[in-house]
Image: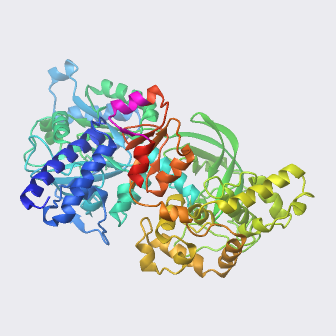
Amino acid sequence: MQNINEAKQRVEQLTFDLNNHNYNYYVLDNPTISDFEFDKLLEELITIETKFPELITSTSPSQRVGGQITKTFATVKHKYPMLSLSNSYNEEDLLEFDRRVKDGLQLNATDLFNNATIEYVCELKFDGLSIGLTYENGKLLQAVTRGDGVQGDDVTNNAKTIKSIPLQLKGNYPNLFEIRGEIFMPKNVFEQINIEREDIGETLLANPRNAASGTMKMQDSKVVAKRKLDCFLYNLLGEQIPFNSHYENLQAAKQWGFKINNDTKVCNGINEVINFIHYWDHARHQLPFEIDGIVIKLNQHQQQTQLGFTAKSPRWAIAYKFKAEQVSTILEEITYQVGRTGAITPVANLKPVALAGTIVKRASLHNADIIEKLDVRIGDTVFVEKGGEIIPKIVSVDFSKRNVNSLKTQYITNCPECGFMLQRKENEALHYCLNEENCAPQVCGKIEHFVSRKAMNIDSLGGETIVQLFKAKLINTISDLYQLQKEQLLPLERMAEKSAQNLIDGINASKQIPFERVLFAIGIRHVGETTAKKIAKKVKSIHALKLLNKEQLLEIDEVGETIADSILNYFNNPTQQLVLSKLIEAGLQFELSNEQLQNTSDKLQGKSIVISGVFIKHSRDEYKTMIEQHGGKNVGSISAKTSLILAGENMGPEKLKKAQNLKIVIINEDEFLKMIN
Ligand code: IVH
């Protein structure tokens, strides 16, 4: 396409179509094309925009992939203050609210006599961070966080990466208005992030709410784009709002392209509100996102105006907060765990108690500050809660039951495993044991990570055997594994001839594990499985990686400040270097093989591919490797997100039907090989 006019027309058409497909997928949850077709259209748009940058608009779907860095977020004053809601916790509070509303509306005696009911709108109270989105002429102009309610941060670049936030509206919208809502992280996204963090020895994110607000504060919008945040909208503000009732306005906003929650309901009278709350107190656990209550709003704007606001919150709305389930039990002991990275976690060992469907025996005490703040002591009766957090937590102490002779908890000063003096850096919550070379859980944890399935896959070496070998002083670092002799193993308990041989064979076989997995296995902090793959593909060998300076490291996809610093630290640490040189000497793969070098490309970048059926030219595993080498991702089951299916003979009829329904492209072996060649 040479001609700018032609290009402009195509860009407009593609922008329209892609925005529409985005809406179908992320707002209506009803895609009409496959991901592969979507990606093709997006690629076409980006190609034209790269050629004619003057055609890039702020509403182009290409803006959603991120890339803009916000060093400091500008402070923006809210046009309408962002108030919060007053809270209620039980039926009595709600009846009281209903009475206040009726008083405020000055319903007359006849109305009250006839038991006049008020029209309320009940909405789910999404647990995330509030956001105000301003639209002008149908285009997203600005996204601002709540901040202190008077002014917040301009997070427009990051908000644009959230696919359910429309960049361009449809239909009959007002010229200028603000819409407010909640940005949140779906439960499955949160769980996946924590699985990945666990993989790289990072502390886990406490709950989806913190994860969402932490993400929105990130400087690199590309990283935000990967975090798959979502956004429900619930409040329309401006001078040309079309309808007189809140509910009708929400339905109008839905037509303009906003994601409005379908469980929003008009309730006649407070009793219907109470029923709605009862229902969601149970049903909330089935939702794919967290809610922490229900918001109740007067439906009619005229009535809202009549009631007005207090300094902090509207009088026409109230939040009902669900109770986190809570029980009391005895704190029997505080123990301290040492992680693979040396981080110390205090753990409360409790008298077992039933809570929210499970028996709770342990709860996290997080760090020394929390213990100090709670003033929790051994023998105390404590209240344990299962809220948004994954691990139950101690919320308070029942001081009335405290034994007068109880002693204040003294946080440990030395590592419970190796006795080394603990360190706590300024402004850090956690204590660390820095004796990483001799502290058993750190040493064994690192070796366990090294042999794990996604790393060196030495499945003949389990956690218990690692501890056994460590105690027998046979291994202290990952490189010691490659010095092990069968004769050294035989005297060990439960180690017969066969298991010793299996272990040695497994270790030897691991020498063929490809470079990207070795790079993940050696345990450079923050370098997870995916990052290791990206780095390996880019630098091709450990020697090349060692030569990179920080700037060059930052150029690698997925590598940010933290990872770059961590890689530099790794190469500057003499002990790590000694281990590395021994591993190189042992013959592990520290560069891409010739075959990998010839067979790598970005041709399948961003494509999710399902392999199905039986193949003739290569095995399934070989195809899986090829997909990864060319930048694609192997996925197990077909969904609307699948880009492509590589089908052999006898693809299952169910899969075939599903693929056809979702209009996913199916290709055979030959077509695939042609595609990557
Ligand atoms: S309405 C003036 N509706 O809860 C009315 N808020 O303490 C303002 N929230 O800051 C809020 N879901 O972040 C409203 N359906 C909903 C909500 C909701 C979650 C959050 C919001 C607000 C806080 C209120």
Q: What number of labels is visible?
A: 0
Q: Judge from the rendering whether residue 593 lies leftward or rightward of residue 388; answer left or right.
A: right
Q: Residue at x 11, y 40 (%)?
A: 171
Residue toward you, 132 or 580: 580
Q: Answer yes or no: is residue 82 visible.
A: no
Residue 590 lies in the magenta-colored region:
no
Q: Position of residue 125 (x, y in %)?
A: 35, 41
Residue 641 position (above or below residue 404): above
Quadrant of the frame with the N terminus: bottom left
Vertical placement of residue 489 versus 86, above or below: below
Residue 269 position, x and y percent, is 26, 25
Q: Which residues are magenta?
A: 656-668
Q: Is residue 664 magenta?
A: yes
Instruction: Decide which of 294, 645 is in the foreground and name it.
Output: 645
User: Is 327 situated left or right of 298 in this image?
Assistant: right
Vertical placement of residue 452 versus 261, above or below: below
Q: Where residue 527 appears, x then y in whole percent?
A: 54, 65
In-image side of 314 versus 545 (left or right): left
Q: Nearer the viewer, residue 620 or 191?
A: 620
The quarter of the displayed image where residue 101 is located:
top left
Residue positioned most to the top: 114
Q: Residue at x 54, y 51 (%)?
A: 195
- The image position of residue 397, as x and y in percent, is 60, 50
Give the colour scheme of this rendering. rainbow
Residue at 47% x, 39% y is 323
Is residue 509 visible in the rendered image? The answer is yes
Q: Quadrant of the C terminus?
A: bottom left
